[in-house]
Image: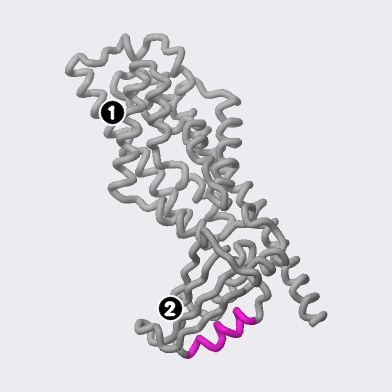
Amino acid sequence: MQHLRITSPRDLTPAVLDALRADEAVTSLTCVRGASLVPVGDLVEADVPREAVNDVVDALRAIGVQQEGAIHVVPVATWLSQPALDAERRTPGSSADSVVWADVTQRAYEESELNWTFLTFMSLATLIASIAIVLDSQILVIGAMVLGPEFIPIAALGLALVRRRPSLLRYAARSLLVGFAVAIAVATLAALAARALGWVTLEQVTAPRPATAFVYTPDKWSFIVAVIAAAAGALSLTSAKVGGLSGVFISVTTIPAAGNVALGLAFGVFDEVRGSLLQLLLNITGMAVAGWLTLAFQHAVWSRMSERRALVAARIRRRA
């Protein structure tokens, strides 16, 4: 169940109430006249099953509430209401499977923003990955993967195509390009400093590293794992049941590959630079394509679900 909190300009409130009353999924509809000071208007609240949120939000956006007011969509952790339960039962689909596109899009914008926090996490993760490769430590590689913030911007590329948001596509692509460039530059400078101090030698960088050799030796499995992980990640981002993202983070070799690129540049081992760049491109491409296909499939399914919900509502009105 989701709770809608709408700050409505006074002249739009009648249209807002009509739109909410017309939807069979809306329950607990409340209007507090004059409660909004900026903009001058009213506060409207309602409960809506998660499966119906997209249709209700689209109807409110068509009215133009978001231009001067606001639409808040808040998950309800616990609720007791027979009318709400009835509304949820007659709304097609499953709450766990449903996608609240406004929520997913907002998260994509927020976590794809190019800021100092994003660049810092990218740089720190890549530094840890570089150390992990020198030490041939799988534990440190996993730590670097989890620390890296690159997955959601990669998923945002597919979301931008599905939801037709060119600004999000530019936003996410810029963050990824600048983020990886800065992270590799920082790790390269650190590797040059470590080389000058004698902490890391060329022999260590070129020695056999059985635990981390996958970082610079891409193959078909690199792409396959990236595709599977991205599909799981997209489902974790859109589903009401989350918890799979940590598994996604430690499944794809993006940050470790960036770390090895930095080491290769610092020590002039260009074979590993080429292999790691190919690994990085394979993973990003596989994740972006799989994320796009997964989100496109969900978009198609829930578009048909909206049509089905409209037919069910029409039948209920005819019976009434």
Q: Which residues are magenta?
A: 11-21
Position of residue 50 measured from the top left corner of the image (x, y, whole percent): 60, 62
Of the image marks 1 and 2, the number of the one nearer the N terminus: 2
The residue labelled by disc 2 is 69
User: Does the image show residue 99?
Assistant: yes
Position of residue 143 measured from the top left corner of the image (x, y, whole percent): 39, 29
Q: Residue at x 72, y 62 (%)?
A: 92
Q: Residue at x 53, y 46 (%)?
A: 242
204 up-or-down from 19: above or below: above
Position of residue 175 measured from the top left corner of the image (x, y, whole percent): 38, 48
Dot 1, crowdedness within 10 Å: few (<14), some or many (≥20)?
A: many
> Do callouts 1 and 2 mark residues in contact (Cβ within 8 Å)?
no
Q: Residue at x 50, y 32 (%)?
A: 252
Please tell me which residue lies in front, 187 or 127. 127
| Corner quadrant of residue 136 | top left
95 up-or-down from 36: above or below: above
Q: Residue at x 54, y 74 (%)?
A: 46
> SS class of the residue under badge 2?
loop
Position of residue 316 measured from the top left corner of the image (x, y, whole percent): 78, 76
Residue type (three-letter) at the residue carrying disc 1: Thr
Mark 1 vs mark 2: in front: 2
The residue labelled by disc 1 is 188
In the rendered image, the quadrant that contains the C terminus is: bottom right
Please tell me which residue lies in front, 244 or 147. 244
| Corner quadrant of residue 49 | bottom right
Q: Does residue 17 belong to the magenta stretch?
A: yes
